Image (cartoon, rainbow, N blue to C red):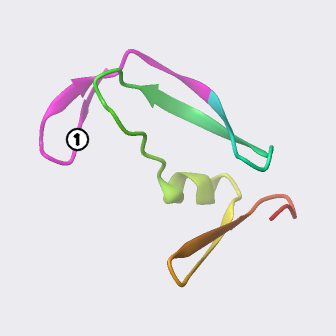
């Protein structure tokens, strides 16, 4: 699958699947429908997709607080 990135370029996704993002606190964010794109040097997580999965967000003073299943 090809994806179009912000500068209009098209990049190839090598795989689509689930990914467990382990935070420094030890908590795990289970990300679904992730695209693995080897040519990208940074990862992008869309807040809107997490919101649809039940995550809640609070943006204050340059920080983001995330709440899911009563865990901060």
Relative to 41, is 44 above or below? Answer: below
Q: In the rendering, at what x and y percent does residue 18 appear?
A: 62, 27
Residue at figure coordinates x 50%, y 77% from the top left: 62
Residue 9 rendering spot, x and y as whole percentages: 13, 35
Asked which quadrant contains residue 56, the reply is bottom right
**Picture residue at 56% right of the left edge, 74% below the top:** 63
Between 45 and 25, the one lying in front of the other is 25
Outermost residue toward the top in this view: 14
Depicted 49 relative to depicted 31: above or below: below
**Which of the 4 quarters of the picture holds residue 14?**
top left
Which residue has dot 1 on it? 5
Left or right position of 45 against 67:
left
On screen, residue 45 versus residue 50, left or right, reads left
Query: Residue 33: horizontal and vertical position, in percent?
Result: 54, 32
Which residue is pictured at 42% across the width and 40% down the height? 43
Q: Quadrant of the N terminus?
A: top left
- Which residue is at the front of the view, 55 or 63? 63
Figure label count: 1
Q: Which residues are magenta?
A: 1-18
């Amino acid at each position: 699958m090809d994806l179009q990135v912000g500068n209009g370029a098209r990049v190839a996704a090598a795989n689509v699947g689930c990914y467990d993002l382990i935070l420094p606190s030890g908590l795990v964010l289970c990300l679904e429908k992730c695209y693995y794109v080897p040519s990208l040097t940074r990862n992008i997580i869309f807040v809107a997709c997490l919101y649809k999965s039940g995550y809640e967000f609070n943006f204050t003073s340059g920080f983001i607080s995330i709440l899911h299943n009563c865990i901060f």
